Structure formats: structure tokens, C-alpha cells
Image (cartoon, coloured by chain):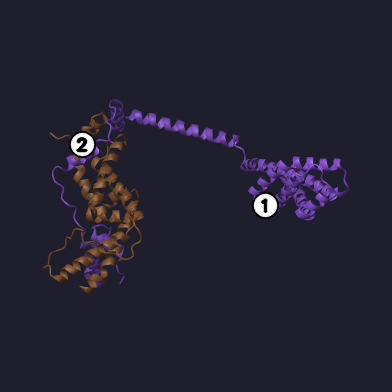
Chain colours: A purple, B brown
Amino acid sequence: MKHLTDEQLIEHYFGEGANRVMVETHLRICSRCEQVLEDITSALEVRGPEPPARDAQYGDRLWQSIQAPLTPYPGDPRRARFSWRISWPRTPWPSLVLAGACLLALAAAFFSGSLWERLRPHPNQAANSAQAPAQVKERVVLVILGDHLDRSERLLVQLNHAGAATPQSVDALRAEARQMLPDNRLYRQAISAQSDPTMTAALDHLERVLLEVANAPDQLDPDDIARIEHEMNTDSLLFQIRVLRARTTQAQTASASRKGSI
Amino acid sequence: MTKDDHSLVRQVLAGDKDAYGVLVSRHGETMFRVAFRITESEPDAEEVVQETFLRAYRSLPAFDARSDFRTWIYRIAVNCALQLLNRRKAEAAVPIAEEYDEERPGLQLVHRGAGPDRLLLDKEIEHRRHAAMEKMTSDERLAFVLRHIEGRSTDEIAAALDITPNNAKQAVFRAVQKMRRSLAPLWVKS
């Protein structure tokens, strides 16, 4: 024998369900289903607390408690709208006007949709045009940084060979260091924001060297230069700058080839 | 002669704010009873009733004159109660143990001689009934109260909760099952 489901029994309890006669017949012959219905009935006989009684003035007190923030409606325009809402279904004209307006709106939506499809740029084009400025910016940064590293390499090479240089060449070295210093600071800060620790460390090292050279006394003799080279470990810095310059050149090439593929 | 609800609504929209006071007085207690049955808390029910009438006043221009005002405001009250239940659930911390609140009003059970055993059983029943109500989702709880306590039809519940009649029926079904599971051990004991 197929038993009744809990859902059928709950529906039966609430006086719902399509086959009430079938359910009642089944319950008369099936003690198991009868027991389940008894359980459901027992559970549902348990009622929660009844609402506390309110006195006759409750409604007035409630109104007094909420009326202050309510502002009166302006009047006629609202009434007109309200009465329109009541009366419009009784006459056919507003319905026809409404139907006409709906058709017009539909036609306008269709026309503007097709126009939009024609005028709208293709998604791939939009993506490419969004990517392009970012790639151009990336290439510009690489070119500028490459130039800066190139200048830095030349300055370090000159510094390493300055022992035999004339006072004029030392002045030129100092002037170059002073010129490069603000640029280097700017690049270091920018690279630091992009979180490239190797490049940041190299530019930081370079900045200390540039500072030392730029603030060197007027008479920079070979001993001073040797001290700077030794203390600032310029040989190691030169190697680092060369590696970084090579890396930047590679990145420039990759960026240019990506541009070609777009 | 007392004016019907629609006339009062028209008066309110025409600028007569006091006409709304008549509507509040007329339906306030009914809405309180509904709110209390859903929230089972007097302060919460008061809050729901106030919020209901404030919200209804602001929405009055959108009231469809073909509808019944009582049904319309009833739906607003149910929605306000639902929002309050959800807010209370979000605010509630995870309980370490479920405690029975002695302050809560008593059960409406048949009096069979209130001996110590009966009082103890009543407490246990209330504790389990309350726990089952807490376990219900907001929709289940509302559907259960509206169907079982308020005697609303499935279609009315569906309209009040803005769900399909089938979902309303399922919500009632799940709620009854939760109540039944929670109370079943007591029937075995007794």
C-alpha cells in the first residue's frame, strides 16, 4: 500500500489538497498515516503567545505617535491621478491610447536598438583601443628608463677611468651627475611604486653615487675618485646597470612586437 | 455614518492628513495582532505597526483604488515584519545555549490541572516551539504564521510574500516539518 506523503497530510490538515476524499479514505484504513497526521496535528495545536489586548484608544495613540513627521499631500494633482486610476478601465479610450503608446515605444526601442548596434564599436575593437594607451605608456617608460640607464652606465665608466682625467673632465662628470640626480630620484620613486625591487635597489645605489659625485669638492683628485669607487662599489653598480639596461632593451623589443600583433 | 477606506484615502490624497488618522485607528489593532504573531514580541510589534503606517502614508499615491486597503496595508505590515526579523537575525549573536525566557507570555494550552509535571512540560513545549520558530527562515516563519495562525490562503500568502503559490506552499510545509521535528520527542515522552 502506498502511504500518503507528509505534504499531502499537511495540506489535508489545512483543508487543502485536490484529493480530499482519497486522503480521508486512506486514513480510515492506514494506521501509520493516521499516526503521522496525529503528530502533525499535535505539533500544530501548540500555539504561540496570543497578542496582548489593546484598549479602545490604541488606534488614536498610534496616530498621535506617527502623525508629526507626515506632511499633508498637496491636493488636487494627487486627487486627479487617483481618480484616473479608478476610472480608466471603465472606458475603452484610455486603454486604446495606452496600447498605441506601447506600440510606439516598442517601435522606438527597436529602431534605437538597431541604430545602436550599427554605431556601437565592436567589443574587440573597444578592448584593443582600451589596451593601446596602456601599451604606449609602457613603451615610453621603457625608452626613457633605457636612456637613463645608458647615461648612468657612461657616467660610471667615466668615473672608473677618471683617475687619469683632467680637471675639466671631472667638472663635466660632476655637472652630469647633478643633472641626472633629479631624474634618477623620479625614476626610482616611479619604479618603487611598480614594485620592481631589483631596479629600485640599483637606482637607489646610483642615487648615492650621483650625490657623492655632484657634491664633491671642486678639486676632485684621483685619490678622491678612488675613494668614491671603493666606498660606493661602483664596479658592482656598473655591472648591475648593464644587466638592467639589457633587461629594459628586451622589454622594449617585446613591447614593440606586441604592438605589431594588435 | 462612517466613511469607507477608499473615501478616506481620497481625502488624504486631497490634502486632509487627519483622514489618515481614521484609517490608522481603524486598522491599527489588526496590524498589531499580525505583527505580534510574526515577531512574538510586543516592542517589535509596536515598531512594525508604526513603520507600516508611515510607509503606507508615503506610498499612498501608488495605492491602486481597485484594491482593498486592508489587504494592501496588511502586505506592508508583513514586509515590515519580515525586514525586522531579518534585521534581528543579523544582529543576533550565535547562542551558546538556548535559554527559555521566563518573561514570555504563557502558552494557550488546554488546562489539564496544572501540576508540577504539567508546568514543566508546558515550559519544555514552549521552549521547543520557540526554538523551532527561530530555526525557520523569515519566509517560512511568515508563511507559517499567515497560514496556521492567521488562516490565510496559499494565494494570499504568495501575494503577501511576493512569491509563487507553490513556493508559499513549500514554505508552509518546511515550517510545519521543523515544528513537528522539534516537538516530536515530547509526544513520545508524554
Q: Where does the image place residue A27, in percent across and percent down from the top left?
A: 23, 68
Which circle marks residue B21 in the picture?
2
Residue displayed at 69% across by 44% down: A185
> According to the image, label 1 marks what residue?
A196
Q: Secondary structure at mark 2?
A: helix
User: B46 or A163, which is in the foreground?
Assistant: A163
In the picture, residue B75 is in which quadrant? top left
Give yes or no for contact between labels 2 and 1 (Cβ–Cβ under 8 Å).
Answer: no
Specify the amino acid type for callout 1.
Asp
Element type where label 1 sits in the image: loop
Q: CA distance from mark 2 to mark 1?
A: 71 Å
Q: Chain of mark 2?
A: B
Marking on residue A210 = none
- Residue type at mark 2 is Gly
Q: Tag 1, which chain?
A: A
List x then y, in percent, for residue B94: 35, 61
| Position above or below: B97 against A245 | below
**In terms of depth relative to the viewer, which is nearer, A139 or A124?**
A139
Name the mark nearer the viewer: 2 or 1. Answer: 1
Check disc 1: other Cα within 10 Å, few if <14, some if 14-19, many if 20+. few
| Residue B72 appears in the rendering | no
Of all residues shown, which one is farthest toward the bottom? B189
Answer with left or right where residue A204 lies relative to residue B188.
right
Give the image location of residue B82, x and y in percent: 31, 50
**At 79% across and 44% down in the image, what residue appears?**
A151
